[in-house]
Image (spheres, grey):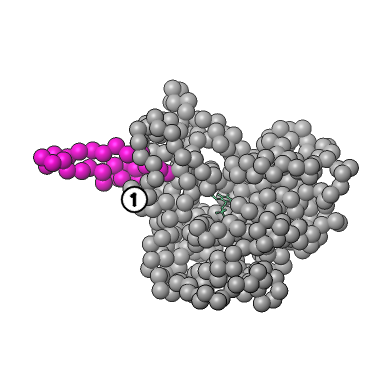
Amino acid sequence: IALRHLTHRHMRGPDGSVLLQWFPFNLCSGNPLFLEPYWRRHAAASAVVFSGWHRLSYITTDGAFHSVELVRHIRRLHTAVGNAVVDDKHVVFGVGSTQLINALVYALSPEGNAASPPASVVATVPYYPAYKSQTDMFDGREYRWDGTTAAWAKNGSRNSTRDFIEFVTSPNNPDTTLREPVLAGSSAIVDHAYYWPHLTHIPAPADEDVMLFTASKLSGHAGSRFGHAASNKACHCKWALVRDENVAKRAISYSRQSTYGVSRDTQLRMLKILKVIMANLQGKDDIFAFGYDVMVSRWRTLNAVVSRSTRITLQKIRPQYCPYFKKTKEPSPAYAWVKCEWEQDVDCYQTLLGAGIISRSGISNDAGSRYTRVSLLKTQDETSTCSWRGSPNSSTPRSTA
Ligand code: PMP
């Protein structure tokens, strides 16, 4: 992809000679702009207009701060796509799924019991860094970040007096593998941000006790900041007796106390977006078919380039049957998980930067500097949105998306 961009950067000098401009391509963040062309095509149908008097109130018509209609559409979409069983679950909204990360940790932690030790929040390497940074930030008496699962799996989590809250990301960010909990007896928060048919095959509808989703990777509306969690009414987690519906209640209470719910304007926009998605599902302009075509062609191009090199390798993904498309699909992952194979390339991030690509170092996932993540989710031509230009030695902006 970057090689193709580089050819776009041939410019004519004043004497007509060809100049090669050297700008690094910012493929660091997971900004999902690959879906922008889809929404440009559906510009009128997806537009939302509301008057100045509308939705002034803190509460919606049913006395809550979430739209019942939006919950209904979320359930319908999951059922139609076949990626999650949510009909029997509580649905909780968040300001992006980012807000729900800590809301769910809080909801699953031992409730105000001074006698019990704090819950241990863990994840398996390589993991999405926000689980650690958020847990560290809100570190309290009830929970704390306790590292990666490997050590606990070895020593036997069952024998520990601790309660484990395990983040499981499936497909995983950054390496895109489908994952399951590792620690026996942990309460798992299964983050399904990428469990949609444009980014993975869907082997079966997900049905875990606590699941996390985000509009950012479903429809591309990262700027609207909307995520949702689905939690089981009778949660089979360690504190089931106390908890039952408490997981949802505590997550809602977190949302009430931190933001008083998700922006009502955002909820209206998301309702419209879901209606457009539903109206086109399995039709001639299905968003997942569109997104899949874009992503599969990026993955193919990248593999064709990388297969000629011994210096870097990518994660291996096999074609898989996807019930949504009713066919075997080539891979269409959100990220390339790059490994630098040559001995001297100890810092793979720097190696790629030297080739003009800004990536996200595997250091942030506890995977080490031999690895780095390249986002495939951005625009076709990143030139226009590349926010940082400079020599490979300049400092780079970092975000967690
Ligand atoms: N979970 C995962 C695995 C992610 O990759 C991201 C964003 N990159 C998020 C959660 C947060 O997404 P958002 O806050 O935009 O919903």
Q: Residue at x 39, y 38 (%)?
A: 357
Taking 72 as reference, is 384 left or right?
left
Relative vertical location of residue 232 with respect to residue 384 in this rendering, above or below: below
Q: Find out whether residue 15 is within the magenta segment.
A: yes
Secondary structure under tag 1 reads: helix
Residue reaching furthest right?
115
Q: Residue at x 42, y 51 (%)?
A: 378
Say which of 104 and 178 sits in front.
Answer: 104
From the image, tell me which residue sits under label 1: 384
* Among the 4 quarters of the image, the one containing residue 20: top left
* Among the 4 quarters of the image, the one containing residue 64: bottom right
Determine crowd level at label 1: few under 14, some 14-19, many 20+ residues with C-alpha closer than 10 A. few
Say which of 296 and 76 sits in front.
Answer: 76
Relative vertical location of residue 56 with respect to residue 316 in this rendering, above or below: below
Q: Residue at x 42, y 39 (%)?
A: 358
Say which of 319 and 264 sits in front.
Answer: 264
What's the residue type where badge 1 is placed?
Answer: Ser
| Residue 53 position in % (x across, y down) | 55, 76
| Residue 156 position in % (x across, y down) | 78, 36
| Residue 112 position in % (x across, y down) | 84, 49
Extent of the magenta region = 1-27
* Among the 4 quarters of the image, the one containing residue 390: top left
